[in-house]
Amino acid sequence: MITIDELINKIKWDKRENPSEYSLFYIDRITKKLVEIKYSDIKRIDEGLIVLEREGEETNIPLHRIREVRMKGSLVWKR
């Protein structure tokens, strides 16, 4: 099975992929619910973290908290 960092890099660099079709879902530590991240919200990936930029602020999400990746609503990866 492909790791989450390998999948994220594949989505970013593979010319056959369209990043705007992907969403990642991570578990929120406070609400214990899955939260959706649109791939387009990812500013960069740094050493085990996804860095998001929303409303001018950066948020870090550890890769180990990602639980699912969906393309056009269909599940393509699950932890």
Image (cartoon, rainbow, N blue to C red):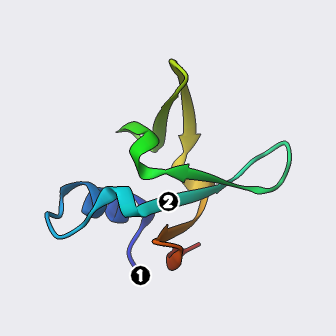
Q: Quadrant of residue 12?
A: bottom left
When the figure is inspected, residue 38 is found, relative to residue 61, above or below; the finding is below
Indicate the secondary structure of the residue bearing disc 1. loop
Query: Type of residue at label 1?
Result: Met
Marks 1/2 in contact by CB < 8 Å: the verdict is no
Amino acid type of disc 2?
A: Ser
Q: Position of residue 48 (x, y in %)?
A: 45, 44
Callout 1 crowding tier (Cα within 10 Å): few <14, some 14–19, many ≥20:
few
In screen coordinates, is 45 left or right of 29?
A: left
Q: Identify the residue at horizontal 79%, vertical 45% (top origin).
A: 29
Q: Residue at x 39, y 63 (%)?
A: 21
- Label 2 sits on a secondary structure element that is strand
Residue 36, numbered label: none
Q: Name the residue under label 1.
A: 1
Instruction: Give residue 62's position: percent from left, percent from top.
Output: 56, 44
Q: Which of marks 1 and 2 is nearer the N terminus?
A: 1
